[in-house]
Amino acid sequence: MSMQLGFYFDASACTGCKTCVIACKDRHDHPVGVNFRRVMHHEGGRWEPHPARPGVWTPQVYAYSISVSCNHCAAPVCMEVCPAGAIRKNEHGLVLVDQELCLGCRLCKSCPYDAPQFNEKRGVMTLCDGCAGDAQPACVAACPQRALAFGDIGALKTKHGAVSGIEPLPDPRLTLPSLVITPHRHSPLSRDPS
Amino acid sequence: MQDDEVIARTPDALEEQRGRSAHLPGAAISTTRPAEQRTAGAVTREKTFSAGQGRWVAADCWADCGSKGYNKAYVVDGVVVRMGTDDTIPDSWDRPQLRACARGQALRFWLTGPDRLRYPMKRKHWAPGGGKKELRGRDEWLRISWDEALDILAGELQRIKQTYGNSAILATKIGVIAARALGLFGGFTDKWGKYSSGVWAHVAPLIGFSAEWNDRYDLLKSRLFLLWGANPVWSQAGLPAYTYWQAKKAGAKFIAIDPFYNPTYSMLADEWIAIRPGTDHAMLLGMIHTVLVEDRAGALIDRDFLERCTVGFDAQHMPPGADPKENLTDYVLGTCDGQPKDAEWASEICGAPAERIRALALEYARTENAALCMSGGPARVDNADSMPQALLALGAMTGHLGKSGSLVSVAHHFGTNGGPQLVRGHNSRSYNPSHTRAPDIPNPLAGNRRAGDSYGEPIEGCINLNELNSAVLTGRYTVGKGDIRPINIQMIYHAHGASMNQLPNTLQGVQAHRKVEFVVAQNMFMTTEARYADLVLPVTSRWERYGNVCIGHREQLLWHSQVMEPWFESKDDLWIGVELAKRLGLDPEAVEPWAWKQEIFNQVADARVVKEDGKTYEPLVTITEQDLAEYGVEGEPQQGRIPIREFQEKGIYHLPRSPDDNFGYVYLKAFREDPEKRPLKTASGKLEIHCQALADFVSRRGWTEIRPIPTYNPPLEGYEATFKDWTNKLKGDYPLQLYNLHMPRNAHTFFDNAAVLREAFAHEFMMNPLDAHARGIRNADTVLIRSRWGKVLRIVSVTPLIMPGVTALGQGARLELDDETGIDRGGCANVLKGATPTGGGHLGWNSVIVEVEKWPGEPLEPDHRWPAVIPVKESKA
């Protein structure tokens, strides 16, 4: 493998606006229910009532969004479990589904990022391919906050650091995602569930 | 439903139309296609896209969101196969790409969706005079020809004019194009009032303070940002939030003031102070009080600015003739009424801790370069007429007006980028400026103002937005104090706008629409207005016309071109106006003086761009004799900055900028420097913290009274109204506040029916876990929301991001009324809002009180699983 392609995601800049989700759907003509790129909102917190004055409150909350697609992992679970051998990594490290071989069994939904997407009409799994052939992936070009990038993961890590998992994304040691993240100020690093 | 079946249907549908003289610039046209190419699955599209068989066309997004994105459509054989956004320039902060939002990216899904209207239709049980009017909104539809449709329209217009007079025709938000015909016909009753501005529309000109933005480079000098009710991430997507992000990266501190911790804050805010909707004015007074009493030896208060540039701050600085006791300082200190408007007083109303209010006030006052950025939300509150003066006072006293590095601004739809338009063209996102070089056609019933214009100010013969429905039902409307006049509306004409769905008290609107003799709607989809009509005319989108010209923010001008042929039998609004004119015996050339192509060419020729000196302008485009011949238009050659062909092909011009260019702007700077030489257009020539003209204006409207200084006036349905006993804080029948925010799924009602956007954005009702738990409500339950005006069903999002006691529902979702139960399932927020006018007659969307309970009936399906609304599926009637 000459290089490993992957995504950079800046969680500190992301607003959860889902422009990336729709741009990707448009690019691939996806129906409702099929989303290569997905955005999750992570939020929580509590409210402190004023000890003496009812109706007066102090919030302690956090909220951030994560945009994630296929991470073209170095140890992809999908490839491991596919009974038809329909999933492989190409020379750029992209994890690709061969739709001719795919049985539609959906075992690859074991992906901890939920990346493989079942297309009901065609009866096969489909997967982000980094918009191979385009100048850049649709999501990267679309992001109004410029929070996404795609390229040689080594170069992206040199530029942006070593974090590749923030809560609630899975621990990166599971599948070794080709993903670099700038954490949000409220986002802890992904923890080993054990 | 957006699925492969729909996409497969689209090129077949366009096949039906291909017999016409279709020619899209640059696209390869074939009138027949081999059968194997007709399967428009993704694989086929991929091949055609990669093979470069199509062409990119700059595609209009004309949603009235107040922001702007650049969209392009890749067209193959008349079919749009994908979207793209701005890559016409390399991206930098000096010259940023104008990237689209999620809605823009969904344009082709939306505009080529299965629910686009195809044919003129009449209501099955309609007859001249109305027929079975009670069936409006629930009747069946019959496809008819354009001839029949236009004959019906013209016939009803004439009959109603002859029977009742032109004032019986109510036509609001129909845009300038349709209005030209009606203006020539003798006029029509229009509305006055603005949907979006809240109180700013009538207050700003009178107090001399319109809270404009500074230039975006200047914004980056601020060290502290108070984002007040602000959520540009959802409401004005694109550059506004991106500008704040630059400031954040440069080290500025952000404090959010809002009932809801929205995504803009999750990106930016270092702190969040939660306050209730409609209590912004009280919060501002608490801050003013803090600065007043903490000001030692003038360390905090800019007395020089107050003296030279304002009136009314204290007894020593009153306008001539004013009662000296009627000054802000004495009101805030409680000198006359015994109640200081201190942080404790404010805290009881707004819900933030008093110590937090004090700390914020002092931090704001002590920070030299501070930006207070408020949205329009706090102004869209009943009885909020005096809030802008409180905002003005706080900014003025702390020295934050008219100085580089500081600002007090309102509404992000200027792109957080203030100053004169650097690339000049029309702002045609919210209206269609038609025939810009032709004389306007006046509306005799609107004081002979331009027909179809947006009348912010009161005009005799026009009805305030709050009273439109009641005027139809009661036959009366308010002209002024003690001046109620009769009106007999018998026809409602809907075109460009969504004036049924987007007015308060929607159920009253349903009654009004079932009362009149005739309702007609022109639109692209089966909107609420269309559903309650007798006659529905399918119109083309802007993708189906020659083109359109529109500004972006300060620095961009866009020229969109035709993307596709008219959808089935849909027609331009302009064509409808011309055909109508012919049937009414009017001069069609007066409606359409020249072809739309000529009009767009005129607008492009008239576009101007600022020169390096920052003062003079030159034409944007160069036009040669050859251009004129090739375009086939009339005009004169001219010298400009870029060739006209280049502008058309790119579809956008971005003005290059740099931090030290001559295009900077600081609002009120010139006035601050010399208020004597540059007086404002107010009675005193200064900023009016005491404004008698404003008090008089409100009094003349006849609904409420206010004082010349910004005393706090609780909304009709605000926090105070949730109690039956304020002192003991005993809640009444509607214990929760509700406010309406702009949601990412739609731009008002635009886009709301697109399935991919419904999938991405759920249009949920939001409530705090404490309030939900007290009612046995859990996340994702279906809940019934009740106000004294109506009932709405929604799926609830129980979230800690909204303040206890406050709920929120986005605006713009379409009414789906169950006539038997009277319950709206669509989530139309206006069902819950009353239509009682206050103050200057603005729309107070954010003053609603409700109760909520778990719905015992069938749970709602998520919106994206609802079937698309397609009234006539068959090709033939």
Image: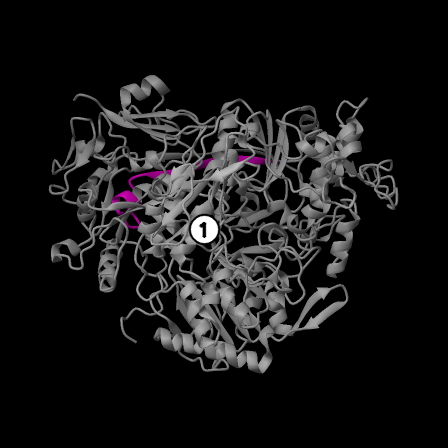
From the viewer's perspective, tell me whether residue A6 is left or right of residue B439: left
Residue B80, image x and y in percent?
Answer: 28, 51
Give x and y (percent) for residue B776. Answer: 52, 51
B481 lies left or right of B1: right
Q: Which residue is mark 1?
A: B63
Res B669 quadrant in image: top right
Determine the image quadrant of residue B569. bottom left
Q: Quadrant of residue A169?
A: top left
- Is there any visible trace of residue B233 in the rendered image? yes
In this rendering, is residue B501 above or below B563? below
Quadrant where the N terminus of chain B sits is bottom left
| Identity of the residue drawn at 75% across and 25% down | B300
On whether residue A31 falls in the magenta region, the answer is yes
Residue B753 on the magenta segment: no
Secondary element at tag 1:
loop
Residue B109 rendering spot, x and y as whole percentages: 33, 52
Which three-letter amino acid code belongs to the residue tagged 1? Ala
Query: Total number of numbered labels?
Result: 1
Q: Is residue B21 left or right of residue B176?
A: left
Q: Nearer the viewer, residue B796 or B17?
A: B17
Residue at image x 44%, y 74%? B582
- Which residue of the protein is positioned furthest toward the top in this rendering? A158
Quadrant in the picture for the C terminus of chain B: bottom left
Question: Which is nearer the eye, B583 or B321?
Answer: B583
Identify the image's colour scheme: rainbow, by chain, secondary structure or one colour.
Answer: one colour
Dot 1: few (<14), some (14–19), or many (≥20) neighbours within 10 Å? Answer: many
Point out the stretch of residues depicted in magenta: A26-48
Q: Position of residue B759 (x, y in %)?
A: 37, 49
Look at the image and tell me whether residue A175 can be seen.
no
Q: For this view, does B136 lie left or right of residue B58?
A: right
Chain at numbered mark 1: B
> Relative to the observer, which residue lies in front, B503 or A119?
B503
